[in-house]
Image: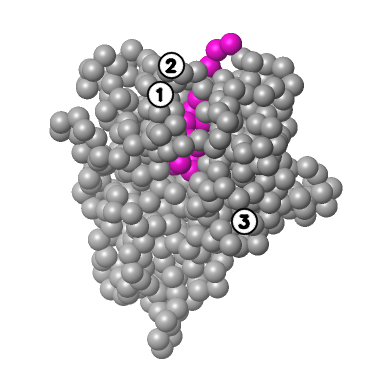
Amino acid sequence: MSRPSVRRLALALPAAVGALALLAPNATATSTPAQIATSTTNGVAYLKTLQAADGSYAGPGLSGEWAFSAFAAAGTAVADVAPGGDTTKNARTVYRNLLSSAGWPASPTPPVTEFERATLNAYAAGIDPARVSASRNLIAHIYSYWQTAETGYFGPSASYNGTVFAALALAGARTQTGAQRVPAAVLNRAVTRIRANQHNDGGWNYSKAEGNPAQLAAPSDIDMTGASMAALCAAGVPNTDPDVVAARTFLSDKLLEPSGAFDAMYGPNSSSNGWAVSGLNACGINPQTGPFLTGMNKTPIDYLIGLQFSPAGGFRYQAGDASPSSYSSIDALRAVAGGGFTSAPPQPVTAGQPRWVAQGSFTAGTATRLALSVDTGTGAPKVCSVSFTPTGSTTTLGTVLDAAGGGATPAGCVTGLLPASGSGTVTSVNGVANSGTSTWKVSVDGSALAGAARNKVIGVGDTIALRYGV
């Protein structure tokens, strides 16, 4: 797989037109709130022109659904984006139908990034990613790529970006009420891996560097540095953390004085700039002040707005390009609008469209998945996706744990459970038994831990965290 396709989560990045760092037509001072608002409005208008006549943004070979993260950052509800005003073809409904279909994803062995991209954009569209349909739970799909031999990695560790976007998706796609549905023990393991892959210069690259001195000493990439620092901050790491500070310093050191652009691997361009700014945004770091304001009074926001066609709204990939790039326009707009790699969905203005859409219950007889983690209290959880077929509109914790014994991916999440039947209190999991005040407790979708009982009701899309302790 080529580097651009890896960085774009299996999407091809538009080729650079020339390698010279041409100066974009920037204003003489840093961009004002009014200029940013105008750029955002025009950018939204351009992204709306990318919608197909059937209402779609995604399809074979395309990943225009990244527009959803830009729309949400800009305050536009995806449910309000409809071709010719035909609300029956609004982009959210069409995308949810795609994700719910048996033919998605098209590959029988998709990379984890397929589910991560879908999670980030479904969330921005107002689709609960754990409850896309009775059979589609994107959070559980991501859990299924947990690497038991290298805990904290999602998907093959050689493809480091799969772990970065797992952290972005699992930490960023919160519940409909804004709760963090994934337990800290799972996110912390991913954070540990992200830290271990940070290069000596403070940034990151798309491939694994952990344990490889030559890779750790290699130059970092602007794009993946933005994504990696965003993943750390989304998972709860403060922007004062030394690793985030090192990443900020790496980016500021790559700033070009005359334009405010980052000196990216393929030369200054709006996509790399957009990813870097989104990383700063996610960490609450202002991209127009301090080390991101050059001595010539230019910033990364100035550079991006300088690449925008006005009033048409599209963004060039590089200065001198004669036409806008759809992918670069998405990256740039998301950054200019203040977004990270996903945003909570705004309230639609279209009559009858709720802020969220979600499957409300299991469908008896329809196979599904649930996300499960089992932590003995050591901070080294077992993580898996549990496949089973419910017999009613809800199920029980005992049924899910029984199913995990033989239907979990990866295997080994639950290797022993007591009691093995009935409806009583869970007394032992994987050979670790309740003892005194140390007992097995359960949290669902980030709820407070409570005593684990086999008869606890579990609903469609619930993210289940078992933890042993006081």
Q: Secondary structure at mark 2?
A: loop
Residue beneath the point at 36% across and 44% down: 344
Q: Residue 277 or 22: which is nearer the viewer?
A: 22
Amino acid carrying label 3: it is Val
* Picture quadrant of residue 337: top left
Q: Indicate which disc residue 244 carries.
A: 3
Asked whether residue 128 is in view, the answer is yes
Q: Earlier in the sequence, mark 3 or mark 1?
A: 1
Residue stretch rendered in magenta on the structure: 322-342
Left or right position of 412 against 69: right
Residue 176 magenta:
no
Res 104 → quadrant: top left
- Marked residue nearer the N-terminal end (2 or 3): 3
Label 1 belongs to which residue? Answer: 42
Q: Residues within 10 Å of mark 3 (few under 14, many from 20)?
A: many
Crowd class of label 2 (few under 14; some 14 to 19; many from 20; radius 10 Å): some
| Distance from the alpha carbon under mark 2 to that under mark 3 | 36 Å
Which of the two discs, 2 and 1, labels the residue nearer the N terminus? 1
The percent coordinates of residue 146 (x first, y second) are 55, 51
Pick the front one: 470 or 345: 345
Per the image, label 3 sits on a secondary structure element best described as helix
Q: Is residue 98 left or right of residue 356?
A: right
> Can you give x and y, in whole percent of width and height, for residue 398 in the image?
33, 63
Figure quadrant of the N terminus:
top right
Q: Is residue 327 magenta?
A: yes
- Which amino acid type is shown beneath numbered disc 1? Asn
Mark 2 touching mark 1, by CB under 8 A? Answer: yes
Residue to which mark 2 is pinned? 312
